[in-house]
Image (cartoon, rainbow, N blue to C red):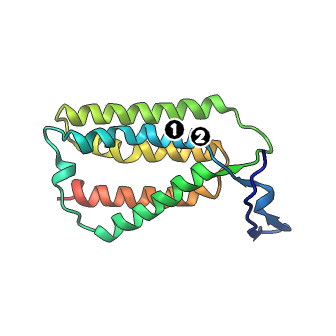
Amino acid sequence: MRSRFSFVIKLKEKGSKEMNLSKHYRFTFELLGLLLFLAIMLPNFIWFAVPAPQDVLRTAKSVFPMIEKLGSIFQILFIAALCFLRHIPDVPLKKHYWQIGIIGMVLLYFVGWGCYYASIVNLIVLLDLCLAPCLALLLFAWERKNWIALPFGIAFLVCHVSSTVANFLIK
């Protein structure tokens, strides 16, 4: 079923004709994008309700609050692009490789939260909690050929890593 909403953005690629993105993207709901996002957010919802024994994430004061705010904006744009823009595939990728990577990153993220709740708070755990969810979502965007979501995801990753390093790893 074709969406009633469409958008037209024309890009001029080097050495090529203009490209109409409405021919390559559809404004529609991407259920798997939302399910992946909710799976990644599940440990965060638990953390909001039940603090960890050694909860450095809750007690840390932000060194660069503007970077965190900018990261939140990029995160919202990234998730919105993943959940509401679908690339009309030309050539399907071998999905099982991408799915293994995505599932692996989500499982690694859950292991990181398990370590965090077991009071194992170190460089590896904090980087896992920072990198694994971002990489899972970026792999999903790449697998779906959602080139509009990728720049937002990369910008969110840079802000998230910068904030984590500044707040927890550089003392």
Q: Nearer the viewer, residue 25 or 150?
A: 25
Q: Residue furthest right?
A: 17
What residue lies at 23% left-to-right and 59% top-to-bottom?
A: 167
Circle number at residue 85? none
Q: Residues within 10 Å of mark 1 (few under 14, many from 20)?
A: few
Q: Where is residue 158 shown, x and y percent of the image? A: 43, 59
Q: Disc 1 marks which amino acid?
A: Leu
Q: Residues within 10 Å of mark 2 (few under 14, many from 20)?
A: few
Q: Quadrant of the N terminus?
A: top right
Q: Nearer the viewer, residue 27 or 101?
A: 27
What residue lies at 26% left-to-right and 45% top-to-bottom?
A: 48
What residue lies at 17% left-to-right and 59% top-to-bottom?
A: 171
Left or right position of 52 against 66: left
Quarter assignment of residue 121: top left
- Residue on which disc 1 sits: 35
Q: Secondary structure at mark 1?
A: helix
Q: Nearer the viewer, residue 54 or 167?
A: 54
Q: Where is residue 2 shown, x and y percent of the image? A: 78, 49
Q: Secondary structure at mark 2?
A: helix
Left or right position of 147 against 16: left
Q: Nearer the viewer, residue 170 or 60?
A: 60
- Residue on which disc 2 sits: 31
Residue 27 higher or lower than 119, as above or below: below
Residue 5 higher or lower than 65, as above or below: above
Quarter assignment of residue 120: top left
Q: Where is residue 126 shown, x and y percent of the image? A: 28, 45
Q: CA distance from mark 1 to mark 2?
A: 6 Å
Contact between labelled residues 2 and 1, with CB atoms less than 8 Å apart: yes
Q: Where is residue 94 shown, x and y percent of the image? A: 69, 32
Q: Disc 2 marks which amino acid?
A: Leu
